[in-house]
Structure formats: structure tokens, C-alpha cells
Image (tube, rainbow, N blue to C red):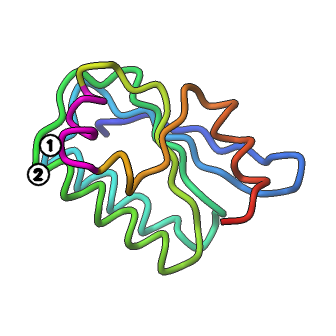
């Protein structure tokens, strides 16, 4: 498995899966993330992907992240990215995907967004 995970229940009883991908998000690792999220989609209210351990992201990885977002949005579940390095954040900004994804500084800030309505 190219990521570690943690499931938390927030104060309002929302169940959130926090994923910590390791090193890179490319077609292989991104597909592994997507498959895992598809398997647990009925058990959770949303996903936080913590980028603190990511050093590489390519276009195939971006495609997988977009597919994850689409899957979760169709089920009215949230996807939030946290702890993105400046280098990785530049990729989101240059592709305008920072407008598509919710990005926060850390997991606590992301957890607070689960209390807000979209």
C-alpha cells in the first residue's frame, strides 16, 4: 500500500478518512488511492488527503485525483487536500485545479470544513 490511513469521527458524527500518500502520486499510486476510496465510499462522509509526505505529482496523478473528486461529489461527500508543499501547490495553481479542489493548511482546518455546508 502506497499510503497510510486513519479514520476519525468528528464531533458532529461525520466519519472522515484521512489518507497519507507516500512519496508520489502518479498513475499507479493514484489508482490505488482511487480504488480504496471507491471501496469505502459508503462508510464515510468525506476524505482528507494529507500531502505532507508527497514529493512528486504528475499529470496521471492529477487525473486520478480528479476522478476521486468526481466519485465523491456524485455521492455528496467532501474531498479536502492538506499540507501541500509549495512545489506541489504550484502544479495546482498553474493548472487552475486549485479552484476545483479544497486545499487547507492542515488536517484540523480541513476537519472544520466538514461542519460547513457547500
User: Of all residues shown, which one is farthest toward the bottom?
Assistant: 74
User: Of all residues shown, which one is farthest toward the right?
Assistant: 11
Q: Relative to 12, is 90 on the left or the right?
A: left
> Residue beneath label 2, please?
60
Q: Residue at the location (23% across, 56% down)?
A: 31
Horizontal and vertical percent position of residue 40:
52, 64
Instruction: Give the structural element (helix, strand or loop) at label 2.
Output: helix
- Look at the image and give the residue range highlighted in magenta: 88-96
Asked if the residue under mark 1 is in contact with the one under mark 2, i.e. CB atoms within 8 Å, the reply is yes
User: In the drawing, what numbered circle is on residue 26?
Assistant: 1
Quarter occupied by residue 52:
top left
Q: Relative to 117, is 18 on the left or the right?
A: left
Horizontal and vertical percent position of residue 69:
40, 63
Q: Earlier in the sequence, mark 2 or mark 1?
A: 1
Q: Residue at the location (42% across, 68% down)?
A: 38
Looking at the rendered image, the quarter that the C terminus falls into is: bottom right
Amino acid at each position: 500500500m502506497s499510503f497510510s490511513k486513519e479514520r476519525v469521527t468528528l464531533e458532529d458524527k461525520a466519519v472522515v478518512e484521512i489518507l497519507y500518500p507516500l512519496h508520489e502520486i502518479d498513475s499507479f499510486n493514484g489508482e490505488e488511492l482511487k480504488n480504496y476510496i471507491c471501496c469505502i465510499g459508503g462508510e464515510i462522509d468525506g476524505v482528507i488527503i494529507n500531502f505532507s509526505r508527497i514529493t512528486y505529482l504528475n499529470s496521471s496523478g492529477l487525473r486520478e485525483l480528479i476522478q476521486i473528486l468526481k466519485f465523491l461529489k456524485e455521492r455528496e461527500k467532501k474531498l479536502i487536500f492538506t499540507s501541500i508543499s509549495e512545489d506541489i501547490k504550484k502544479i495546482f495553481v498553474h493548472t487552475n485545479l486549485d479552484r476545483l479542489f479544497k486545499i487547507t493548511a492542515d488536517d484540523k482546518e480541513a476537519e472544520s470544513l466538514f461542519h460547513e455546508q457547500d
